[in-house]
């Protein structure tokens, strides 16, 4: 049986959604890298009884390792250490050496402030030097040390700030109690496949067929989700089951090969960035608020290939900035093939680019007509060699959904144009 772990994320601000949980997913990825099976992630507020309830639950589930995040500060609502000590049946003791280290850290921090009572600050932070008897102390990155408490299960207690937690993770894992707790770990492989232009239900049908026809399919742990209009399939398995995964991928390619654009986990954004090497791209957007240009520039070195961007909502902006002929707008409307192509041509010319993408559409609400309802979007990719690919889609959802899906469609249309692939019907 593989080594199993659970994560307890503490913090009322995380529980109520005021702060997004960044620690749970990060620790989950690190556990996967270690070959440790993650059983549960729980989130609870800064209440001792609730924290202890999560610890008892995970222990009852038979996990070998528990990782807690948060609640290690000097204030009254920081109670993770004392709660874990009670849960593990260990006394709390002041670690004099640790107290001295915290004092040195505080003295350095307080040096930049005037009129601060250092002794008062030190007294408040003395709480952070009180640790369970027999615990392995993890050196602090901020002022809060972490601790590892050996036992069944072994408990790693880490601070809440992600910068501190991440910097302390390696030391926690290297400690003897953790190494003993994860001694039975298994090496896992994880492969991510991404598809575009496929309904999640279509993949679900293929997976049902695989479950029926492929021996050992149950040994694959598969999760699917719809993300930014793409279907993502993540498969986790032990190395002896690599042949089972190979058979699954044969079936997926056979059924959905034209929609598979990534088998190595790469994003379409990464692929487009690589394809734009040596090129210069410009964008013209009227309904996506510059989100496409933001995706293009959210990559290292993007200044080498992004020439410029125009967000032109009004017809006057389309005419004045992008040089769209007003007669085209009068004849066909701002949301049309003709105007999309004119916007792309205008972006090419204005920025001296060799590649352009234009998006014009109706994200709503209230902007649609029976002929062009909300969600109607035209896309155009235009290359300097004359290649022009234009298409229209009716996208579902609210304004934010339509905008996000539009940028994904544009990225995939751009990718296919740069690869010289035929566009899907």
Image: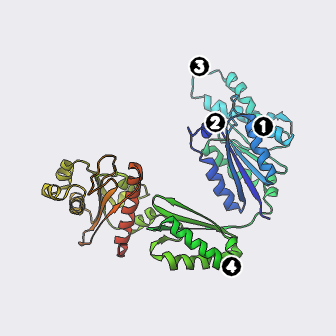
List x then y, in percent, for residue 43: 66, 43
Q: The C terminus lies in which quarter of the figure?
A: bottom left
Q: Judge whether 218 appears above or below 15 on screen.
A: below
The residue nearer to you, when weighing 272 against 246, is 246
Name the residue tied to disc 2.
Answer: 12
Q: Judge whether 25 appears above or below 85 on screen.
A: below
Alpha carbons under labels 4 and 3: distance apart: 72 Å
The residue nearer to you, when weighing 135 against 333, is 333
Mark 3 or mark 2, which has the lower sequence index? 2
Mark 1 or mark 2, which has the lower sequence index? 2
Alpha carbons under labels 4 and 1: distance apart: 47 Å
State the mark number for residue 83: 1
State the mark number for residue 115: 3
Q: Judge whether 248 appears above or below 66 on screen.
A: below
Quadrant in the rendering for residue 35: bottom right
Question: In the image, which is nearer the foreground, mark 4 or mark 1?
Answer: 4
Secondary structure under badge 1? helix
Mark 4 or mark 1, which has the lower sequence index? 1
Name the residue tied to disc 4.
Answer: 215
């Amino acid at each position: 049986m593989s080594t199993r772990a659970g994560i307890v994320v503490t913090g009322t601000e995380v529980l109520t959604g005021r702060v997004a949980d960044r620690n749970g997913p990060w620790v989950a990825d690190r556990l996967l890298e270690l070959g440790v099976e993650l059983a549960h992630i729980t989130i609870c507020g800064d209440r001792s009884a609730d924290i202890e309830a999560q610890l008892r639950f995970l222990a009852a589930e038979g996990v070998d390792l528990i990782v807690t995040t948060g609640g290690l500060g000097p204030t009254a609502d920081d109670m993770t250490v004392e709660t874990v000590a009670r849960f593990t049946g260990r006394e709390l003791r002041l670690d004099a050496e640790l107290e001295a280290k915290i004092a040195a850290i505080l003295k350095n921090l307080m040096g930049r402030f005037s009129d601060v009572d250092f002794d008062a600050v030190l007294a408040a932070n003395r709480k952070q030097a009180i640790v369970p008897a027999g615990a392995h102390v993890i050196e602090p990155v901020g002022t809060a040390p972490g601790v590892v408490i050996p036992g069944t299960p072994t408990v790693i207690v880490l601070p809440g700030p992600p910068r501190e937690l991440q910097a302390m993770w390696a030391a926690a894992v290297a400690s003897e109690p953790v190494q003993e707790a994860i001694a039975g770990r298994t090496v896992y492989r994880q492969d991510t496949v991404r598809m575009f232009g496929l309904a999640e239900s279509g993949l679900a049908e293929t997976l049902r067929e695989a479950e029926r026809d492929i021996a050992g399919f149950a040994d694959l742990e598969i999760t699917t989700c719809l993300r930014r209009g793409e279907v993502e399939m993540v498969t986790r398995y032990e190395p002896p089951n690599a042949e089972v995964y190979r058979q699954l991928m044969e079936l997926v390619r056979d059924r959905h090969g034209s929609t598979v654009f990534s088998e190595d986990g790469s994003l379409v954004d990464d692929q487009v960035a690589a394809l734009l090497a040596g090129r210069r791209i410009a964008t013209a957007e009227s309904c996506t608020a510059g989100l496409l240009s933001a995706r293009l520039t959210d990559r290292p070195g993007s200044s080498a290939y992004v020439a410029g961007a125009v967000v032109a909502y009004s017809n006057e902006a389309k005419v004045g900035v992008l040089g769209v002929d007003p007669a085209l707008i009068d004849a066909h409307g701002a949301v049309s093939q003709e105007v999309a192509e004119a916007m792309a041509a205008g972006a090419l010319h204005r920025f001296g680019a060799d590649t352009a993408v234009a998006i014009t559409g109706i994200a709503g609400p209230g902007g649609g007509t029976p002929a062009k309802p909300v969600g109607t979007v035209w896309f155009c990719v235009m290359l300097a060699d004359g290649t022009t690919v234009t298409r229209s889609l009716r996208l579902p959802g609210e304004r934010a959904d339509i905008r996000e899906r539009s940028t994904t469609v544009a990225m995939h249309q751009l990718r296919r144009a740069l690869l010289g692939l035929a566009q899907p019907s």
